[in-house]
Amino acid sequence: MKRIIYISGILGGLLLIIGLIGMIVPFPFNGLWLLAGVILLVLICIPLMMVDRYRYNKKIDHIIKKCKGQPSKIERLSTEKSKVKRWSMNNSPFRERKSGLTWGGGNVKGANATRGNRRKFLI
């Protein structure tokens, strides 16, 4: 049904545009293009869109009625330490670490490892 809505809407719009351009620049069968575009839009596309919207709203109402009497589940994250001894997103060996050794660089004397600060020269 959606495919028919899209095809008739696009084709009807194109025929309508061709018919409106044909009012300025005379085309053969100008009235036919305009009439075919209006018929496709008014008699096929718009009613099918309304039926599709009605079915969608009925489906949503059915889902709401079905779930109305059920209690909602509230899931909370626990603050306890995990008992799982595998990698997680917090202790993955592949993530970038912000603390640890940083290497100063640029020359031989600056290539010493320091913690938290870089070696400063010319002070």
Image (cartoon, rainbow, N blue to C red):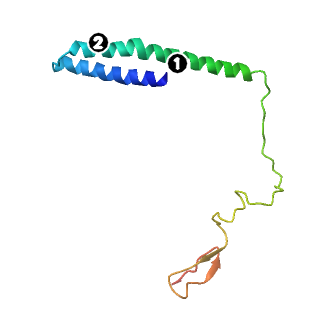
**113 left or right, relative to 44:** right
Q: Which mark is residue 1?
A: none
**23 left or right, relative to 81:** left
Q: Is residue 121 above or below residue 78?
A: below
Seen at 51% across and 85% down, the residue is 107
Residue 108 appears at what percent x and percent y? 53, 88
**113 left or right, relative to 46:** right
Q: Which residue extends farthest left?
A: 26
Dot 1 lies on which element? helix
Residue 7 appears at what percent x and percent y? 40, 24
| Tag 1 residue | 52
Q: Is residue 45 above or below residue 104?
A: above
- Name the amino acid, label 1: Asp
Residue 45 appears at what percent x and percent y? 42, 17
Residue 20's image quarter?
Answer: top left
Q: Is residue 107 above or below residue 15?
A: below
Determine contact: label 1, label 2, CB under 8 Å.
Answer: no
88 or 32, which lies in front? 32
How many labels, in total?
2
Residue 83's image quarter?
Answer: bottom right
84 or 47, which lies in front? 47
Measure the C-alpha gap from mark 1 to mark 2. 25 Å
Residue 47 appears at what percent x and percent y? 46, 13
- Name the amino acid, label 2: Leu
| Tag 2 residue | 35
Packing grade of label 1 (10 A; few <14, some 14-19, many >=20) is some
Seen at 52% across and 18% down, the residue is 52
Packing grade of label 2 (10 A; few <14, some 14-19, many >=20) is some
Residue 113's image quarter?
Answer: bottom right
Seen at 34% across and 20% down, the residue is 12
Seen at 53% across and 80% down, the residue is 105
Dot 2 lies on which element? helix
